[in-house]
Amino acid sequence: MRILVVEDDKRVAGALRRGLEAEGYAVDVALDGEDGRWLAGENDYDALVLDVMLPGVSGLDLCAELRERGDWTPILMLTAQDQPDDEARALDGGADDFLGKPFSYAVLVARLRALVRRGSGPRPTELVVGDLRLDPAAHRVWRGDVEVPLTPRQLSLLELLMRRTGEVVPKSEILAHVWDFAFEGDPNIVEVYVRQLRTRIDEPFGRHSIQTVRLVGYRLDAQDA
C-alpha cells in the first residue's frame, strides 16, 4: 500500500514515514500543500494523511480540490484538538476521517487500515441528479444555476429522495427519516411537503422529477430531473 503524508512538521512527518514503512507501507512525504498537490496528481495512492494547517495550500483546500476533480482516495485529516471547527470542516470538505493532535500512532494506523479497506469509490459532498444539486452541509439547493430556497424539512425530504434516486420510497419510510419513528401526526403531511417541493424544484422549471407511485410512495426520476 502506498501512502502520501502531507505534514509541515518535519519531526512528525519523519516519525510517520518511519512508522508506516515499518508497517509495510510505501510512504511519500510532502512538507507543504503545493508539493502535496503535485504528488497527489502524479501518483496513485491508497490513502492520504493531510494536516489541516499547511504552508501554501491548506489541507482543507487540497482535500476539496481532489474531490472536485473526482479523486476519491481515502483521506485522513490531522486536526488541532483545540479547533473543533476544523473537524467539521474536514468532514464537510470531503475527508473520510480525522484525528486530533497529539494522536496515538496505533490509532492512526488502525484508521488508515480501515480507510484502505473502504476503498476509493465516489463519496461526493454534494448530491447531483440531472441539473438538481444539493449541498447537505451548506443546506443549499440549486436547479441549474438558480438557487432554490427550501425549509430544513423540505431539504431533508429532497435529500432522502436524491439519495434513493430511481427507487420508490414508501411514505412510512419518509415519515421515519424526515420526521421520526414516533411521529403520531397526520401521515398526509408527506403529501403536503411533496407538493411544496414540486412547486419549488419542478414546476417553475418545467420538470416532473418527483413522481407519485400510487399506494406505495414517491420516486425521484433521474430522467426528468
Image (cartoon, rainbow, N blue to C red):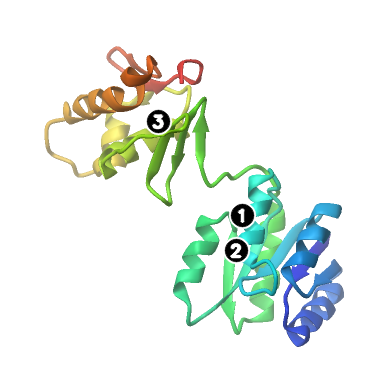
Q: Is residue 43 visible?
A: no
Q: Residue at 51% of width from left, 80% of height from top?
A: 81
Q: Residue at label 1? A: 64
Q: 193 left or right of 4? A: left
Mark 1 lies on a secondary structure that is helix
Task: Find out whether the residues at labels 3 and 2 contact each other: C-beta distance under 8 Å.
Answer: no
- Given the image, on which type of amino acid does mark 2 rest? Leu
- Image coords of residue 53 (percent x, y): 62, 75
- Image coords of residue 162 (percent x, y): 44, 32
N-terminal-most mark, 1 or 3: 1
Q: CA gap, disc 3 to disc 2?
A: 29 Å
Q: Residue at label 3? A: 161
Between residues 133 and 169, which one lies in front from this camera angle? Answer: 133
Q: Residue at 68% of width from left, 48% of height from top?
A: 72
Q: Residue at label 2? A: 60
- Given the image, on which type of amino acid does mark 1 rest? Ala
Position above or below: 220 against 142: above
Q: CA gap, disc 1 to disc 3?
A: 25 Å
Q: Residues within 10 Å of mark 2 (few under 14, many from 20)?
A: many
Q: Is residue 34 visible?
A: yes
Task: Find out whether the residues at labels 1 and 2 contact each other: C-beta distance under 8 Å.
Answer: yes
Q: Residues within 10 Å of mark 1 (few under 14, many from 20)?
A: some
